[in-house]
Amino acid sequence: MIIQAITWQECLPIRQQVLWPHRPEIFCQIEEDKDAKHYGVFIDNQLVSVASLYFKTINGICRVRLRKFATITSYQRKGIGRKLLSHIIQDLASSGVDYFWCDARKDNQNFYLNLGFKVIGQSFYKFDIEYHKFEIKLN
């Protein structure tokens, strides 16, 4: 398993396949992708998991948002996503990031809680799917 930086264009097929299979690939692109940092997990030279990070500093506090985190279905529940997020958390903490957060589907709540995230606020819906905001303080 290799974790490395990838381009936003490399993220799109997995985002579409996992997160929004009934939507066109372009639906999975975010305007801020060009300024974001993207990670990918490769197994046997195949990209199997992606995560995108969006940085914002307000009043000297650096906050990073995780969006469009997805792992190909046949590779889920094998610890790949956990290793990827653990790698990202370590990178962010060592680079001085204060907070790391995401909106995640309620179905994935235990995954984030087990990594040290806390639920922030009430649940909400996007396209009829229930979400929670999760946040972890890094520094």
Image (tube, helix red, strand yellow):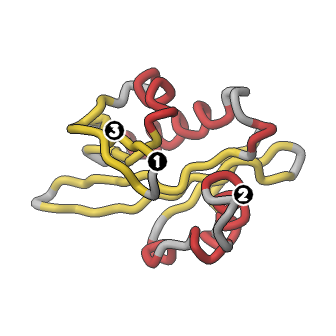
Residue on which the image places disc 1: 129
User: Which is more foreground, mark 3 or mark 1?
Assistant: 1
Q: Please give the name of the residue rendered at 58% of the width and 31% of the height, measured from the top-left corner.
A: 82
Q: Please give the name of the residue rendered at 82% of the width and 43% of the height, measured from the top-left corner.
A: 43
User: What quarter of the picture does the C terminus occupy?
Assistant: top left
Can you tell which mark lies on residue 134? 3
Can you tell which mark lies on residue 17? 2
Amino acid residing under circle 2: Gln
Q: Residues within 10 Å of mark 2 (few under 14, many from 20)?
A: some
Q: Depth check: give the residue in front, 139 or 7.
A: 7
Position of 69 with respect to 117 (left or right) is: right
Query: Disc 1 vs disc 2: Cβ atoms closer than 8 Å?
Result: no
Which of the two discs, 2 and 3, labels the residue nearer the N terminus? 2
Position of 40 with respect to 133 (left or right) is: right
Q: Residues within 10 Å of mark 3 (few under 14, many from 20)?
A: many
Secondary structure state at the residue bearing disc 2: helix
Marks 2 and 3, how far apart in space? 24 Å
Q: Which of the 4 image quarters holds residue 26?
A: bottom right
User: What quarter of the picture does the N terminus occupy?
Assistant: top right
Which of the two discs, 1 and 2, labels the residue nearer the N terminus? 2
Q: Looking at the image, can residue 67 be seen?
A: yes
User: Which is more foreground, mark 1 or mark 2?
Assistant: 1
Amino acid residing under circle 3: Phe
Position of 22 with respect to 27 (left or right) is: right
Secondary structure state at the residue bearing disc 1: strand
> Which residue, as the protein is rendered here, is positioned at the far front?
128
Secondary structure state at the residue bearing disc 3: strand
Which of the two discs, 3 and 1, labels the residue nearer the N terminus? 1
